[in-house]
Image (cartoon, rainbow, N blue to C red):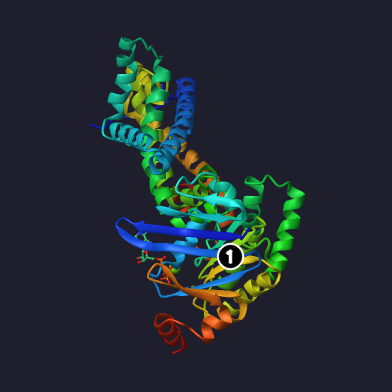
Amino acid sequence: MPALRIENLKKSYGTVPVLKGINLAVENGDVVAVIGRSGSGKSTMLRCINGLEPFQEGSIVVAGHRLDQSRANLRDLRKEVGMVFQSYNLFPHLSVAENIMLAPRVVKGLPRDQRELLVRDVLSRVGLAEKASAYPDELSGGQQQRVAIARSLAMKPKVMLFDEVTSALDPELTGEVLKTIAELAEAGMTMVLVTHEMGFARRVATRTVFMHEGKIWEEGPSAQIFAHPATPELRSFIATDLK
Amino acid sequence: MAYEMNFTPVFARTPELISGTIDTIVLSGQSIVIGLTIGLAVSILRVDGPKWAAAASAGYVEAFRNTPLLVQLFLLFFGLPYIGIRLSADHAAILAISLNLGAYSAEIFRAGLLAIPKTQIEAGLALGLSRLQVMRYVVIIPALRVIYPALTGQLTLTLLGTSIASAISATELTLAGAKIESQTFRSLETFLVLAAIYISITFAFRLLYWIVGLWLFRRSVPKTGSAVATLSLPREAET
Ligand SMILES: Nc1ncnc2c1ncn2[C@@H]1O[C@H](COP(=O)(O)OP(=O)(O)OP(=O)(O)O)[C@@H](O)[C@H]1O
Ligand SMILES: [Mg+2]
C-alpha cells in the first residue's frame, strides 16, 4: 500500500476550481517535490492531505487513513502526518522543548521521562541540541524552522509535508534547513515537499511533480523531469527559474 | 463660610468600614472569577462554537452591554421573584455583576482570540491537537497577553461598579458608608474616606493583576518585545 494515494481530488473555493482532479501515489520512502507557478494549487493540495482544507470530490489515503468529504477521524490521521509551514508557526509562549513536547504530551500522553529523551533525540536530528530551553524569539529564522521540523518529527510521523519551508528565509539560512530535510530524506522519511528550490528538488527528491492550473501537469523521476521536460509549460517554468 | 472638617465621628465607625471593605473585596473577587469564566466561555463559543451557540452568545453580550448595570440588578432582585426565583441581595449582586462582566470581558477575550494568527491554530491542529486543546495550549496565553491591559481596565470598572449593589442593599462598602453618613451627617468626610478606601482597594487589585501578568507571561517576557511595557505597574502604585 502506498504511503499516500490521492484519487480524483477536486476542490474549489466558492465557484472557483483550484484543484481539478489530482491523482498521485507516493510510496514509502519516496521524496516527492511539488513545483509549479504561484497559484497553481500546490499549497491547497498539501493542506487537503492533512485535512486542513475540506474538498468536494475524490479521496485521499495517507499513512493508512482514509480522508474524504466526511472528515471523520482527522485527528488520528494528523498524528501520523507531519506538516511544516512556510512561517514556522512555533508557539511563542513555549520554549523549544515545550513546543516539541506539547503534542506528544497532550495528544499521546507520553510520560515525562520519555518526553525529555524525545526532545533530545529530535533536536539532535536537526542539529539544535543546545537550544532546548530557548524561546522562539531568541532563534534565527533557520533555527526556528529546524525546531518546527523537530516538533513535527516528535510525533513520529509516517509522512511529512513541507510547504515552502525555506521561502521566508534569507539565502544563507536556507541551506541549513535544506540540509536537515536532505538528512531526513536519507533516513528514509516519506515526504512531499512544495518547493521553489529547483536545485534541491533535483538533488534530493526521488520524484518531482509539476502542478499547473490545478492539475498535475507532469511527473516523473526528478532527473528526468528537469533534464527532459515533456510539456512546454514545464519547459518555460524551468527556464524562468534558471534566469 | 468655612466648613470645619471633622473625621472623628466617621473614624469612630471603623469596624463597619472594615467589614464594608471586606464585603466589597469579596463581592468583587467572586464576581471577577465568575464573570471572567463566563466571558471566556462565551467568547470561545462565539468565535469557535456551533452556529446556535455563537448566536446565543452574541445575544447575551448585546443584552448585557446595552442595558445599565442598575437595571440588571433590579431585574434580578425585584423581577425574578415574580417567576419564583428569590435571591438574597448579596446573591443578586454577585449574579448581576458577574453577568455584566461576563458580557464585557467576552468582547475583550474575543478580540484577543481573533488577534492570534490562523496559522498558529493550524500548526496546533496539524500536530493532532483537538480544537479545545489548541485553544487551551496554543491560543489562550498569547491572546491574553494581547488584551491584558484592556481586561484589567475592565476589572477595575467592575470593581468600582460593585458600589451600585448598595441600591438593593447588598452588603458592601458604599452601603456601609451611606449608613454612616445618614447617622453622623458628616457627608463630606464619610465619602472622602470611602473614596480613599476605594482607591486603596483598586490599587491593591491592580498590583495583583500585575503580579498575575508577570506569572502568566513569564515565558514571553521578551528581551525585545512589548509585553513588559504594556504590563507596567500602575504608576500610582509605585510611589
Ligand atoms: N482561502 C482561499 N480562498 C479563496 N481562494 C483561495 C484561498 N486559498 C487559495 N486560494 C486560491 O487558490 C489557488 C491556489 O492557491 P495555492 O495557495 O494552493 O497556490 P500555490 O501553488 O501554493 O501558490 P504559491 O506558490 O504562491 O504558494 C490560488 O488561485 C489562490 O488564489
Ligand atoms: Mg503555496
The quarter of the rendered structure image containing the N terminus of chain B is top left
Horizontal and vertical percent position of residue A153 = 65, 60
Q: What's the residue at 40%, 27% (across, down)? A: B7
Query: Tag 1: Cα neighbours inside 10 Å, few (<14), some, or many (≥20)?
Result: many
**The quadrant where residue A180 appears:** bottom right
Q: Is residue A119 above or below residue A224?
A: above
Q: Most extreme residue toward the left, as rendered?
A: B1
Q: Is residue B231 above or below residue A139?
A: above
**Quadrant assignment for ligand 1:** bottom left
**The quadrant where residue A20 appears:** bottom left
The residue lying toward the viewer, choosing from A89 and A28, is: A28
The residue lying toward the viewer, choosing from A187 and B198, is: A187
Q: Is residue B71 above or below residue A215?
A: above
Residue A87 in view in this figure: yes
Position of B114 compared to A162: left or right? left
Amino acid type of disc 1?
Answer: Val
Q: How many marks overall?
A: 1
Position of A237 compared to B69: left or right? right
Circle 1: element type: strand
Pointer 1 residue = A26
